[in-house]
Image (tube, helix red, strand yellow):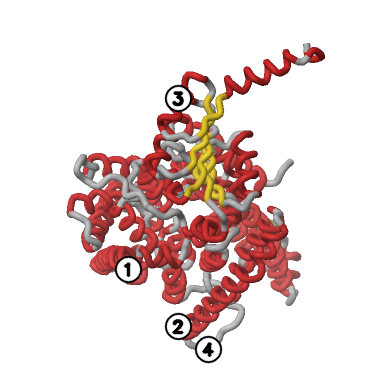
Amino acid sequence: MPDNSAVHIAIVLFTGLISGWICKKLNISILIGYLVVGTIIGPGCLDLTATRAHKIRQENRKAQSYLDSEYNTENLPEENMTGVPGEIDPAKGVSVSGETASEIAETPNSEKSLTFSEADIDKDLEEQLRREREEDDVLEKYAEFGVLLLLFAIGIEFSLDKLMAMAYYMFVGGLLQMVLTCSVITLFFYLLGLSWTAGIVSGCVIALSSTALVYKSMEEAYRANTRDGRATLGVLLFQDVALVPVLLLLPLLFKSENIEEPVFAVCDNQWIDMVVKTLIFGGAVIFGRLIIARFFIPQLAKFRTNELVILFAIVVLIGMCLLATCLGLPDAIGALAAGFMLGENRLTSQIDALVLPFREAYSAIFFISLGMLMDFAFVIDHPIHCFVAFICIIALKWMTSWVSLMACGMKSRTALGFGLCISQVGELAFMILALAFSANAIEGNAYHTILFVSVTSLVITPNMVLFALNKICPLKGGDEKEELSDKASQVLEEKLARGEGHSIVVGVGHIGARLAERLASQGKTVAMIDFSPVNLHKFAQMGFTTVVGSGSDSVVLQEAGITQAKIVVITVPDDNLALAVVRACNQLNPGATIICRARYRLNIRLIHNAGAKMVVCEENDVCEKMLRLVSIPDAV
């Protein structure tokens, strides 16, 4: 019979698989499915992991232990101590003979023996409860590791160039948005007579939005690469960066016994101690980044083995988390630092692709666990309270985001639309919420209310983004279209500087894979485009630049570096799609040599006219091959 932890993980993964399947059929975000299925299987609804039953069992055992201890330590009735035989205590149902009562009264060690029995019971009960807690904490630990991998992915995307390009949006719009949100929430708590610490914590939680969901939804609406989209992403990036000082400062405000003490202290003043340790950690991160870039990355590139790359990445991740913990800093900061240390080098894309399967699996557990935390009983008992809080928090974030984006230079209507896009409470806010709740810095009703707002707002985020961008601030004919970047990504530019020419392969089947390997062996940089991330995953692990999407999409071609391409090879098996890809490539880079595959002879002239320099026709090649075969006597 498997233990509880294995059963619980199996239930979570199985329900996650089913929800992901349904979401793909319905063409909605898988993360939304994870959140919804988590609320369904959680203790607030079906309780498939028996969490609610376990809590009730723990409470009953504690109550039973209390009754047993009361029975064992409470002195027997005075009338029985006097020697009245056979009298029964109605409260306990115990009959004590006069002789026995006299013996108990005269024995000096009787109380000690009873106390010893109570200690044994408490010790056994605590040990049993500890084992059960360890089983139930396994799922929570997997979810926490999923958070670390999410933060690692965010850290690996950070680059100094990207931060500098968005510095104005980040430090004007992002800072203003967080300050406004935190100030209003703290003032609200103060007016209600609640703790100002709880107000600050709640404000920091509510101020954070979901970068992953918003960015993906804006990409689907083709607004992520516009000037307004980049301003919005700047605000989101500031929230991700601000998570670091928030996680550092808030535990100092809690002053709770639940906060783990650091391994050592630099000085007695906790604020100075935190500053010094943060500087030590920051120096270690910068030094480690330099050592990794100059020594480890070249060596790993020479070995050309995925096993060592993924092991190195995991070792750096766990090592930085341990260093942060030893310094008394949150391990989440260690995960962000590990990603930053491995960013902006020739193996960054490969590391990101290799970590992807782990990140996706643990992220599923994290989002499902986040949904499981929502207590339906609390929502049912306080429906008006929950929904009023939901409307007020979304409205507050919408208004503060609107003001912040206008400060970045957006028009009022456009800022109103993009402000609604980031008005949800993000998934990473749960880290602060859980930390505050465990430290008793926030009470239970506020915890469950904010959790309800977070989960519900995340579920409706894709629809909220589409509504905002299509109804509130739609693109018009005279407005800016897609502001396509004339430059490829930073990593691709570095590859172009080292290579002898840039090539793009559209369509990663057997033919496209062979061509990409041949071009790479000639010293050329190669970018690969395909609809399927599964087809591209292997080549991303090998260090190729990979872009998911259609080769006829200008945005996708720009990401692949079309303006720098010398050769474009199109291997898609559909002639209509191939024709569209040729036209798009020729429009963006007329000087590139375009080689295209065609299935039928009738389409050769069309593809040539669209801009292809050479067309390889399957029909002609098959015909010539078969004619040669029938011309050989032995072949027939």
- Mark 4 highlights which residue? 267
Is 11 above or below relative to 398? above
Q: How many residues crowd around disc 4 within 10 Å: few (fewer than 14), some, or many (20 or more)? A: few
Residue at 47%, 62% (x, y): give it.
158
Secondary structure beneath dot 3 equals: helix
- Mark 2 highlights which residue? 271
Secondary structure beneath dot 4 equals: loop
CA gap, disc 3 and disc 1: 54 Å
The percent position of residue 305, horizontal first and vertical second, equals 71, 54
> What amino acid type is highlighted by mark number 1?
Phe
Front residue of this view, candidates 586 and 43: 586
Residue at 66%, 49% (x, y): give it.
521
CA gap, disc 1 and disc 2: 25 Å
Q: Counting residues from the N terminus, which is met first, the one under dot 1 or under dot 2?
A: 1
- Mark 3 highlights which residue? 605
Q: Residue furthest top?
A: 636
Front residue of this view, candidates 184 and 341: 341
The percent position of residue 556, horizontal first and vertical second, equals 43, 43
- Mark 1 highlights which residue? 171
Do tag 1 and tag 2 residues touch (Cβ < 8 Å)? Answer: no
Q: How many residues crowd around disc 3 within 10 Å: few (fewer than 14), some, or many (20 or more)? A: few
Q: Counting residues from the N terminus, which is met first, the one under dot 3 or under dot 2?
A: 2
